[in-house]
Amino acid sequence: MATDPIHQFQISRWIPIEVGGLDFSFTNSAAFMVATVVGAGAFLLLTTSSRGLVPGRMQSVSEMSYEFVASMLRDAAGTQGMRFFPLVFSLFMFILTANLIGMFPYFFTVTSHIIVTFALAMLVIGTVIVYGFMKNGFGFLKLFVPEGVPGVLVPLVVLIEIVSFLSRPISLSVRLFANMLAGHITLKVFAGFVTTMGAMGAVGVAGAILPLLMTIAITALEFLVAFLQAYVFAVLTCMYLNDALHPSH
Amino acid sequence: MTGFGNALRLSSEFIAGIAVGAALGWFVDRFAGTSPWGLIVFLLLGFAAGVLNVLRSAGLVAENGLRRDGGGGRQGE
């Protein structure tokens, strides 16, 4: 397993559960999702439990993450958008914590499976569609008809807008999944070079310094990507929610 | 946002547009029996949607939903 870069993404059943012919097993993926939720929840609860007026170091980290997401949402969707703050904040913390937990060696990265990221993206788009229709009725469909388009072009533009709208959950989920998957594979491949070259005698050991440096650099890059992808997911969620709040032109 | 993040974002927007167009066309063909016209037409539409997605994320085309009270929420990107 040491040299197989794909092995780290394999799902294994920890507690097999089967209900009515369907597989509900508690897998390593499920276990790390639980760890993510517990970790993020415990961090926020414990760091804010002292409720200091002058926040300590850890409390200010919690407050910063709150302020960060709140200002992001207010910028993109206005003050009305703040009713979605629990959703956006939960998504941001879940993805960020899952990405960071995945950075531990031998840990499973939940967000490197497309079904997980796709479920998150469908949750966002589902919220946008349901809330958009609830709030605006059929006025929500104006989202697909841009203003100032010549009458002849309207059917074509509407079709393009619909395809563009449908591509949102795909781009949202593929981006997160592909980044985590590619990053972890690259990391593993370069780390594998170190051991392979190290077994080739003195010259190999000297040469192994290069992939080792590369591995260190990629690890740093992966931490950046872990944060960046959580941020991008949250920002786009805010922008899509803005469409549900204000679809008219 | 960093240039790296921007690059990843733009490319995935473009690819998603084409992928959704192709998938829609394939399903239309499958259920309406219009092969290969559905695929051709929707692939082209998907290409257009992909370009639209990219231009929109780059801020070169007005966003669909209004930014009246948002006020340029994407400046930081």
Image (tube, coloured by chain):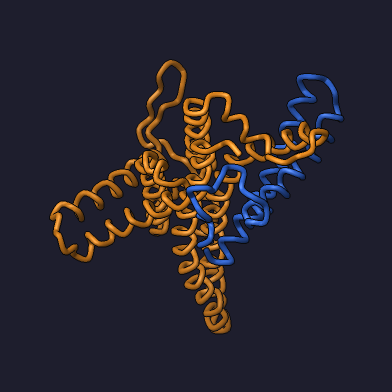
Chain colours: A orange, B blue
Towards the viewer: A175 or A109 = A175
User: Is the residue A223 above or below the residue B9 in the image?
Assistant: below
User: Is the residue A179 above or below the residue A163 in the image?
Assistant: below
**Residue at image x 67%, y 40%?**
A164
Tell me where residue A98 appears, x and y as whole percent: 40, 50
* Residue A132 visible in the shown view: yes
Tell me where residue A79 appears, x and y as whole percent: 39, 45
**Residue at image x 43%, y 15%?**
A20
Tell me where residue A125 appears, x and y as whole percent: 52, 35
User: In the image, A236: left or right of B41?
Assistant: left
* Residue A9 visible in the shown view: no
**Residue at image x 51%, y 77%?**
A213
**Residue at image x 67%, y 52%?**
B61
User: Is the residue B49 above or below the residue A66 in the image?
Assistant: above
Tell me where residue A191 appears, x and y as whole percent: 51, 67
Towards the viewer: A89 or A144 = A144
User: In the image, A239: left or right of A150?
Assistant: left
User: Is the residue B22 above or below the residue A76 in the image?
Assistant: above
Q: Residue furthest top?
A: A20
Q: Quadrant of residue A12?
A: top left
Towards the viewer: A125 or A246 = A246
